[in-house]
């Protein structure tokens, strides 16, 4: 059985223009449009796409921080959609989140010892002060922080160290799933590699499942078992990372792949970057048919009529009328 199973998940927001009259109906923004995927224990799913495609909203919906209009979220076979706030708070012991801005996600008035210990006090109030401090120091050491820094404040640490504090806070209650919402996008490249390697190491030691959200396909490649590519709230490609990177089937995925820097200087100079035409459409007024058609070099009149769904095989699926993946 899957650890997490998301089926036809839809998240909408009502948007009212500041210039509109009060009696005019609010527009509907479909931030997540019928996304489906399964996540196995100890597996990492990478979610990629440009800003505004719905990656973070999808993550927040899974953890109960964004409203769900329709669809299903099964956690170990139990439905999460529709749970009360109190019931969902209990589930967060097993589903923790690491946020994009490491410093902004930490309370500046609390020491890092208090920050890391906060989930323990919430979910295990019976644990005494001495044992709590021992667990916090052990977790600090696990993520690469010095235990004698326990009484310092977040502003005394670098961005990479603050992200390690956030990781320690998420791990302290020994969850089964960690959702990483662009955890390295605000960090230097060298620090990004350190944080990604740390997450891989901890995942191996603790048997965690990860959902890793990023803009950068090269970062996702090094940590993911499978990759979900999103565009304007839709899933356009889903598959094993080696299938996605070896044979990207969707034009949007190929464009993202062409922008990934290559380590070979000669190959980097000679590669062809596939530039996308036009701007990202408004999610309030998306194109008819295939949402990518206004920027797709292969689009024709048929693409304006039909809405392609993910199809293919268990290892690779694509939502495109012009490209397909052989079914097994």
Image (cartoon, rainbow, N blue to C red):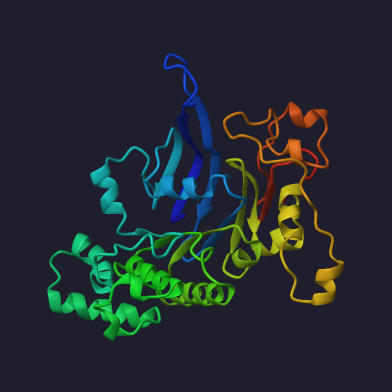
In this view, which residue lies farthest toward the front? 19
Q: Residue at x 69, y 36 (%)?
A: 308
Query: Residue 130 at x, y = what percent?
Result: 14, 79
Query: Residue 277 at x, y = what percent?
Result: 78, 43
Q: Residue at x 39, y 65 (%)?
A: 103
Q: Nearer the viewer, residue 141 or 50?
A: 50
Q: Residue at x 15, y 64 (%)?
A: 125
Q: Nearer the viewer, residue 316 or 214?
A: 214
Q: Is residue 113 left or right of residue 48?
A: left
Q: Is residue 23 left or right of residue 53?
A: left
Above or below, 93 relative to 83: below
Above or below, 266 relative to 251: below
Query: Residue 307 at x, y = what percent?
Result: 68, 32
In this view, which residue lies farthest toward the right? 270
Q: Quadrant of residue 202?
A: bottom left
Q: Is residue 193 left or right of residue 317?
A: left
């Amino acid at each position: 059985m899957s650890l997490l199973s998301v089926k036809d998940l839809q998240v909408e927001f009502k948007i009212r223009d500041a210039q509109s009259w009060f009696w005019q109906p609010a527009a509907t923004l479909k931030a997540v449009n019928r996304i489906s995927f399964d996540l196995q224990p100890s597996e990492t799913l990478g979610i990629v796409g440009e800003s505004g495609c719905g990656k973070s909203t999808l993550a927040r919906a899974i953890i109960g921080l964004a409203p769900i209009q329709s669809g299903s979220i099964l956690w170990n076979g139990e439905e999460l959609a529709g749970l009360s706030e109190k019931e969902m708070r209990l589930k967060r012991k097993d589903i923790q989140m690491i946020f994009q801005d490491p410093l902004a996600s930490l309370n500046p008035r609390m020491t890092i010892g208090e920050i890391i210990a906060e989930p323990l006090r919430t979910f295990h109030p019976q644990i005494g002060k001495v044992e709590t401090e021992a667990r916090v120091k052990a977790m600090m050491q696990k993520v690469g922080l010095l235990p004698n820094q326990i009484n310092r404040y977040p502003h005394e640490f670098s961005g990479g160290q603050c992200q390690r504090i956030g990781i320690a806070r998420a791990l302290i209650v020994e969850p089964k799933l960690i959702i990483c919402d662009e955890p390295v996008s605000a960090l230097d490249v060298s620090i990004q590699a350190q944080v990604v390697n740390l997450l891989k190491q901890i995942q191996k030691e603790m048997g965690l499942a990860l959902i890793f959200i990023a803009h950068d396909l090269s970062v996702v490649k090094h940590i993911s078992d499978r990759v979900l590519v999103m565009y304007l709230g839709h899933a356009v490609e889903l598959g094993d990372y080696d299938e996605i990177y070896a044979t990207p089937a969707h034009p949007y995925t190929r464009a993202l792949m062409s922008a990934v820097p290559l380590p070979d200087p000669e190959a980097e100079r000679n590669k062809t970057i596939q530039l996308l035409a036009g701007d990202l459409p408004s999610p309030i007024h998306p194109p008819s048919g295939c949402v990518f058609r206004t920027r797709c070099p292969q689009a024709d009149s048929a693409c304006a009529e039909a809405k392609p769904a993910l199809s293919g095989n268990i290892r690779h699926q694509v939502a495109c009328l012009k490209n397909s993946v052989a079914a097994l």
